[in-house]
């Protein structure tokens, strides 16, 4: 009697949970994006007409010193090996040494970035608090004088060079009226008067309960933050108006009005609710632009932020500082995009 061979059935693979699949896709996307950013910065550092060895040892170095630094920097290795070393160092927070002050670039960025973050955060709050209601009212009162004023405000915000507005603001509010503090983050009298915990002076002064220093820091930050807030207000109000006009012309809004629903409920509970997801993207991009695009504002107001830091390093051919700052700015964009995706899942029921 022939023996019967039993072959066990292969168990079907269980599908990955949707949240795990989404997480893996997000991590893969982030990894590819950051790898591309690191490749671009590495390539820029290699094509710049600056000898990195001379930048480190100086022009008066001997041939032996030059050769030792050449080997220490790994420039004798193949490019793919150099890129792998660069990625490894960046992943460990090592951007090299600054040529201007011989300090680690990561320490310099950690010192200047809170100043930019404090400035941009107040600026984006001003843009949101004023820009969103202005855009909504302009859409509801389309063609009225309020709409015309809102459109002029947005147009001026887009058209006027921010460095000109900064200079005029300093001349008027600081030089003539004396309503605000001058350039810099605080007066000399209040420097080192309280411990630095977060690097943001307003927060640190509040934690130390030094309200005199808080008032002084606020007088210095309010003008540059208002200029950045006006810049973001112009963009946010314009996009809010556009989104609201699209929703207000939809059939469900007409139906809600026919049913006798109050105008307030139609505008804010229905129309505005449907543009929240779009506004998240607009606000996130605007905030990212303020974090990395406030170079002129920081230069005009002598604000020791990352934009001023990168510009000074670029003019001094300090490529380690320039590339380190560029990587940090790119990381900011990636993090804000991730944060936007998380907010999508909260405010958009379709994503659930």
Image: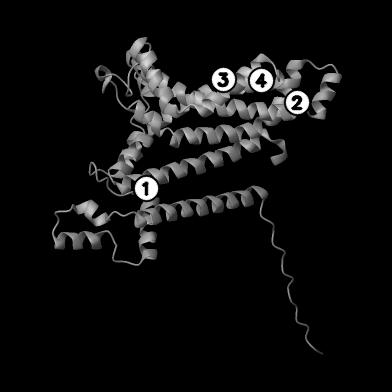
Q: Residue 297 at what x, y percent from top left? A: 40, 29
Numbered circle sitting on residue 323: 1
Between 95 and 41, the residue placed more toward the observer is 41
Question: Of callouts 3 and 1, which one flags the residue occurring earlier in the amino acid sequence?
Answer: 3
Q: CA distance from mark 3 to mark 1?
A: 35 Å
Q: Residues within 10 Å of mark 1 (few under 14, many from 20)?
A: many
Residue that carries the numbered disc 3 in the rendered image: 130
Q: CA distance from mark 4 to mark 3?
A: 12 Å
Residue that carries the numbered disc 2 in the rendered image: 248
Residue drawn at point x = 64 percent, y = 27 percent: 240
Q: CA distance from mark 2 to mark 3?
A: 21 Å
Report if the CB atoms under discs 3 and 1 are less than 8 Å apart: no
Residue sitting at the far top: 177
Q: CA distance from mark 1 to mark 4?
A: 42 Å
In-image side of 210 versus 143 (left or right): left
Q: Residues within 10 Å of mark 3 (few under 14, many from 20)?
A: some
Q: Closer to the camera: disc 1 or disc 4?
A: 4
Relative to 338, is 137 above or below?
A: above
Residue sitting at the far right: 259
In-image side of 107 versus 139 (left or right): left
Q: Residue 42 at what x, y percent from top left? A: 39, 55
- Quarter occupied by the C terminus: top right
Question: Of callouts 4 and 3, which one flags the residue occurring earlier in the amino acid sequence?
Answer: 3
In-image side of 188 versus 177 (left or right): left
Residue drawn at point x = 82 percent, y = 19 percent: 257
Between 39 and 167, the residue placed more toward the observer is 167
Residue that carries the numbered disc 4 in the rendered image: 138
Report if the CB atoms under discs 4 and 2 are less than 8 Å apart: no
Quarter-of-image position of residue 135: top right
């Amino acid at each position: 009697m022939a023996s019967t061979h039993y072959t066990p059935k292969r168990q079907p693979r269980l599908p990955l949970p949707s949240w795990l699949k989404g997480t893996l896709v997000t991590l893969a996307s982030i990894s590819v994006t950051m790898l591309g950013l690191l490749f671009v910065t590495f390539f820029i550092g290699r094509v710049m007409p600056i000898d990195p060895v001379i930048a480190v040892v100086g022009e008066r170095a001997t041939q032996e010193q030059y050769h030792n630094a050449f080997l220490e920097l790994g420039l004798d290795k193949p490019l793919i090996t150099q890129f792998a070393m660069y990625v490894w160092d960046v992943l460990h927070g090592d951007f090299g040494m600054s040529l201007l002050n011989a300090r680690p670039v990561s320490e310099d960025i950690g010192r200047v970035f809170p100043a930019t973050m404090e400035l941009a955060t107040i600026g984006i709050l001003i843009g949101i608090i004023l820009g969103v209601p202005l855009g909504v009212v302009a859409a509801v009162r389309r063609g009225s004088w309020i709409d015309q004023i809102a459109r002029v405000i947005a147009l001026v915000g887009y058209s006027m060079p921010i460095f000109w507005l900064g200079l005029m603001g300093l001349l008027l509010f600081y030089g003539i009226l004396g309503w605000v503090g001058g350039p810099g983050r605080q007066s000399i009298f209040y420097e080192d008067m309280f411990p630095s915990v977060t690097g943001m002076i307003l927060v640190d002064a509040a934690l130390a309960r030094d309200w005199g220093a808080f008032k002084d820091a606020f007088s210095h930050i309010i003008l540059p933050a208002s200029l950045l807030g006006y810049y973001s207000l112009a963009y946010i109000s314009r996009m809010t108006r556009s989104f609201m006009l699209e929703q207000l012309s939809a059939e469900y809004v007409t139906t809600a009005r026919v049913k006798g629903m109050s105008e307030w409920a139609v505008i804010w509970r229905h129309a505005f609710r449907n543009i929240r997801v779009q506004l998240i993207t607009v606000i996130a991009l605007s905030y990212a632009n303020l974090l990395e695009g406030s170079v002129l504002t920081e230069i005009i107001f002598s604000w020791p932020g990352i934009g001023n830091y990168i510009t000074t390093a670029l003019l001094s051919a300090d490529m380690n500082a320039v590339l380190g700052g560029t990587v940090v700015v790119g990381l900011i964009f990636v993090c804000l995009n991730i944060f936007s995706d998380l907010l999508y899942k909260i405010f958009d029921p379709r994503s659930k």
